[in-house]
Image: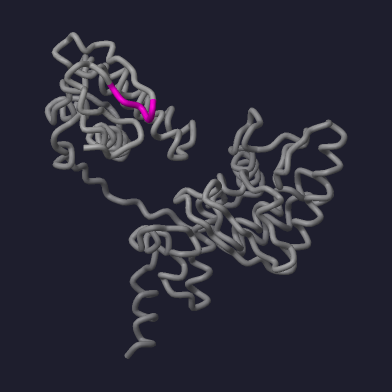
């Protein structure tokens, strides 16, 4: 059964693996034809890379899964059982939420092992970890306005940060998307963002409108960016750059630069829930308050599951009651 680009072919019993048009000899074919973990992960991570997964995601999968294998002294894929997973989880001195994240990663890797016909059944699906979901509060519009008022707009960093804050609050884009944003993603004529799959978590195209103020701010920011890049002789088309002209996604500060700035502003000005995720939630709540439907909000956020969107909206009992009255 061939379910992937990199997969075992029918000659596996001879210790030969097929990878596209290339063929490699299984280094451990002599050991009962079992598949070494190192070899399996190498293939899986190549598959993930081709599928468009980000290096940081692959590194996280590698770190967690190898930790699981080391804890159980697992050297071969065939040694993985439901008991080894339970043993690993029981030995972790972390929160339930962290255990759930680790389990999700292990399940994802095992799913790819199954995809490549290295495992016969999905025994790991039986394992579940229950966690009380903590609903995080959304950023308030009043706090966003205060933040924009307090930040020094006369500096490049200040103006860049204000533009970033308003763009996140008025479009709901994630911090990663913001830092991956290129000039080609902005359609100034039609005042919208045209986001291709490379910038989004679900890898799907998304189009989001811009208001007049944001459009003007982005145009001005791009002009300032060009001056900075010319001065430092840097060549990129990123919309949000460092004061040295580097792209947020390639600089040492990575895509956390804006997040760090928000954390600094939050402490300096005494504002709560000022972080990229809270701002994104604030965008969703603002849309709901203006009458947008949950499916529409879900589409704007790029969610694939309405359940995730409803968590973002954080509706309390009174809000639900008031909304239901409109349908009586």
Which picture quadrant has residue 279? bottom right
Residue 267 visible from this viewpoint: no
Residue 135 visible from this viewpoint: yes
Position of residue 77 measured from the top left corner of the image (x, y, whole percent): 21, 22
On the picture, is 313 further left or further right than 91? right
The verdict on residue 50 being magenta is no
Position of residue 191 measured from the top left corner of the image (x, y, whole percent): 70, 66
Compared with residue 222, is residue 169 higher up or lower down, i.e. above or below? below
Position of residue 219 measured from the top left corner of the image (x, y, whole percent): 79, 57
Which span is picked out in magenta?
A: 17-21
Which picture quadrant has residue 53? top left
Locate the N terminus and report the quarter of the image it occupies.
Answer: top left
Position of residue 222 measured from the top left corner of the image (x, y, whole percent): 78, 50
On the picture, is 228 further left or further right than 169? right
In terms of secondary structure, what is the magenta stretch mainly?
strand
Front-most of residues 93 and 128: 128
Q: How many marks?
A: 0
**Residue at position x 66%, y 49% in the image:** 269
**Residue at position x 14%, y 42% in the image:** 126
Locate the C terminus and report the quarter of the image it occupies.
Answer: bottom left
Residue at the limit of the structure toward the top, as seen here? 30
**Residue at position x 74%, y 66% in the image:** 189
């Amino acid at each position: 059964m061939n379910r992937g680009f990199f997969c075992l072919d029918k000659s596996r019993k001879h210790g030969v693996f097929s990878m596209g048009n290339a063929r490699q000899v299984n280094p451990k074919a002599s050991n009962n034809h079992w598949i070494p973990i190192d070899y399996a992960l190498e293939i899986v991570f190549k598959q993930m890379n081709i599928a468009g997964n980000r290096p940081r995601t692959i590194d996280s999968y590698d770190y967690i899964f190898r930790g699981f294998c080391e804890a159980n002294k697992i050297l071969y894929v065939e040694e993985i059982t439901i008991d080894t997973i339970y043993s690993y989880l029981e030995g972790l001195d972390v929160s339930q939420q962290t255990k759930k994240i680790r389990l999700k990663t292990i399940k994802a890797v095992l799913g790819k092992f199954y995809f490549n016909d290295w495992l016969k059944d999905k025994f790991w699906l039986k394992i579940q970890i229950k966690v009380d979901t903590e609903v995080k509060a959304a950023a308030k519009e009043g706090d966003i306005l205060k933040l924009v008022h307090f930040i020094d707009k006369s500096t490049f960093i200040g103006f860049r940060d204000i533009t970033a804050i308003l763009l996140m609050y008025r479009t709901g884009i994630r911090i990663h998307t913001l830092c991956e944003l290129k000039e080609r993603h902005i359609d100034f004529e039609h005042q919208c963002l045209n986001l291709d799959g490379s910038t989004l978590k679900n890898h799907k195209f998304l189009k989001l409108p811009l208001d007049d103020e944001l459009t003007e701010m982005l145009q001005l920011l791009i002009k300032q960016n060009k001056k900075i890049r010319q001065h430092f002789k840097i060549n990129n088309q990123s919309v949000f750059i460092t004061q040295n002209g580097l792209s947020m996604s390639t600089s040492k500060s990575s895509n956390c630069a804006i997040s760090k700035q928000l954390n600094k502003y939050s402490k300096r000005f005494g504002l709560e829930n000022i972080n990229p995720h809270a701002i994104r939630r604030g965008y969703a709540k603002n849309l709901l308050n203006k009458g947008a439907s949950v499916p529409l909000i879900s589409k704007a956020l790029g969610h694939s599951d309405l359940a995730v969107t409803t968590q973002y909206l954080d509706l309390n009992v009174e809000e639900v009651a008031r909304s239901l009255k409109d349908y009586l």
